[in-house]
Amino acid sequence: MLLSLWKVFRKEISEADFVLKATGRYLYENLTDKYFTPDNLNRYLFQAETPADVRDWVDHRGFDWSLARSAKNPTSKRHILRTILYGFGRFKVARFFAGLFEILFRLGQPAYKIYDIENMLPYVLAEDISNRELVRTDWRCLGWNGVNGEFFRM
């Protein structure tokens, strides 16, 4: 869906100082403009996760996620970037959408059949992450868990 938006509104998106993606089924806390600063025009803005979503490369079912490893940002554990709420500055727009196209290409290959954007974003943004171009915000999401109906705050 984001790539369709990019194809139609590339000019308008490229002219914005910041792009923010928010999933419509959640409520948000602390979603202010305090991170929309000149210093962050060349950065990604992702929620800080407490605790951080860090997993083994081989999961509890024995599936090996190592196709999402990157030599540009080697990690001993697999880091997940949640895509409920995030943003990026003007100078990351083209790089972000190029990463989305790469993810779409990879997800079309049989070896990636159970991968998703949250596992692949750290891979395609690895160089930027290792260059400390990812800011962790204090934004919080609230909503109802689709599995058990419980209200949560993350």
Image (cartoon, rainbow, N blue to C red):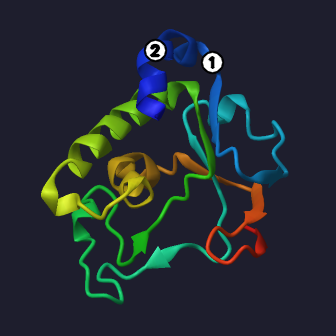
Quadrant in the rendering for residue 116: bottom left
Is residue 106 shown above or below 144? above
Q: Amino acid at mark 2?
A: Val
Estimate how packed mark 2 is, as few (under 14), some (14 to 19) or many (20 or more) residues with alpha carbons within 10 Å. Answer: few
Image position, residue 73 (x, y; %)? 34, 60
CB of mark 2 within 8 Å of CB of mark 1?
Answer: no
Query: The C terminus is located in which quarter?
Result: bottom right
| Marks 2, 1: nearer the viewer | 2
Secondary structure at badge 1 equals loop
Depth order, front residue of 71/119: 119
Secondary structure at badge 2 equals helix
Q: Residue at x 31, y 66 (%)?
A: 74
Quadrant in the rendering for residue 6: top left
Q: What mark, if any, has residue 16 been given in the picture?
A: 1
Q: Residue at x 22, y 59 (%)?
A: 112
Residue at the outermost left position: 110
Q: Horizontal placement of 115 versus 46: left or right?
A: left
Q: What mark, if any, has residue 8 been given in the picture?
A: 2
Q: Residue at x 70, y 50 (%)?
A: 25
Q: Earlier in the sequence, mark 2 or mark 1?
A: 2
